[in-house]
Image (spheres, rainbow, N blue to C red):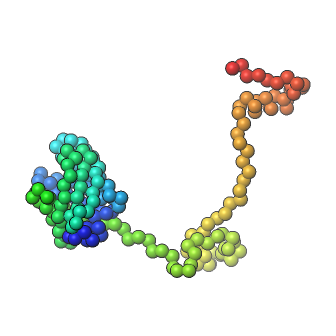
């Protein structure tokens, strides 16, 4: 696969890497250049159950470096694809196979040109009815009134105000905190 095909395939995908012991190690390739894997039964061999790493493209190869697995050494792979099957050859000559389990989901379609993506509730308040399905098909932004919020008072000040309101002549003798 060339660099463009790799870019279109790996980010957002999960590869189930076949191991010589007959087990499978799933490796998830995120869109941000990070990858993560779960060693399963190979945890004792790899040194940890799970690991993360980075991957990047170098010409027409995918390169990677785990944070813990394989002593954190960098390797690059040339890969070929036949449907969901992946065939790889590492830069040191080792070869193997994997299955492409998931691929990136298609991005949502942007709104039509010239059409605002969000309508305000005020535009629909009087015209929207249960029979008018078109008014419910688009997101609606509801503008709430701004509320005046008083900053909280310290407990001692609040207690003093409460006592002053309920005790005779309390306004002349302020309450002092024992601290």
Q: Is residue 128 above or below residue 92?
A: below
Name the quarter where the N terminus is drawn: bottom left
Q: Is residue 104 above or below residue 21?
A: below
Residue under the point 75% across and 33% down:
158
Q: Is residue 161 something that shows in the picture?
A: yes
Q: Is residue 178 above or below residue 94?
A: above
Q: Quadrant of residue 57?
A: bottom left
Q: Is residue 85 something that shows in the picture?
A: no
Q: Nearer the viewer, residue 41 or 164?
A: 164
Horizontal side of 179 relative to 168 (left or right) equals left
Name the quarter where the C terminus is drawn: top right
> Residue 45 at x, y = what percent?
16, 43
Horizontal side of 26 relative to 175 (left or right) equals left
Horizontal side of 9 relative to 94 (left or right) equals right
Residue under the point 67% across and 63% down:
143
Q: How many numbered tags mark residues here? A: 0
Check the image and name the residue furthest to the right.
169
Q: Nearer the viewer, residue 121 or 77?
A: 77
Q: Quadrant of residue 34?
A: bottom left
> Residue 92 at x, y = what percent?
11, 56
> Residue 148 at x, y = what percent?
74, 51
Residue under the point 16% across and 57% down:
18
Q: Is residue 56 above or below residue 151?
A: below
């Amino acid at each position: 696969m060339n660099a463009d095909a790799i870019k279109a395939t790996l980010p957002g995908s999960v590869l189930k890497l076949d191991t010589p012991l007959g087990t499978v190690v799933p490796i998830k390739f995120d869109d941000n250049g990070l990858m993560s894997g779960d060693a399963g039964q190979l945890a004792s061999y790899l040194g940890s159950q799970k690991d993360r790493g980075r991957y990047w493209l170098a010409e027409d190869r995918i390169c990677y470096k785990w944070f813990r697995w394989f002593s954190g050494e960098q390797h690059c792979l040339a890969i070929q694809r036949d449907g969901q099957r992946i065939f790889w050859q590492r830069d040191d000559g080792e070869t193997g196979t994997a299955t492409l389990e998931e691929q990136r989901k298609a991005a949502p379609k942007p709104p039509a040109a010239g059409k605002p993506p969000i309508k305000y509730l005020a535009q629909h308040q009087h015209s929207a009815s249960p029979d008018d399905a078109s008014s419910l098909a688009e997101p609606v932004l509801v503008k709430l009134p701004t509320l005046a919020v008083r900053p909280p008072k310290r407990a001692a000040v609040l207690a003093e105000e409460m006592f002053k309101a309920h005790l005779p002549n309390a306004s002349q003798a302020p309450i002092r905190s024992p601290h």
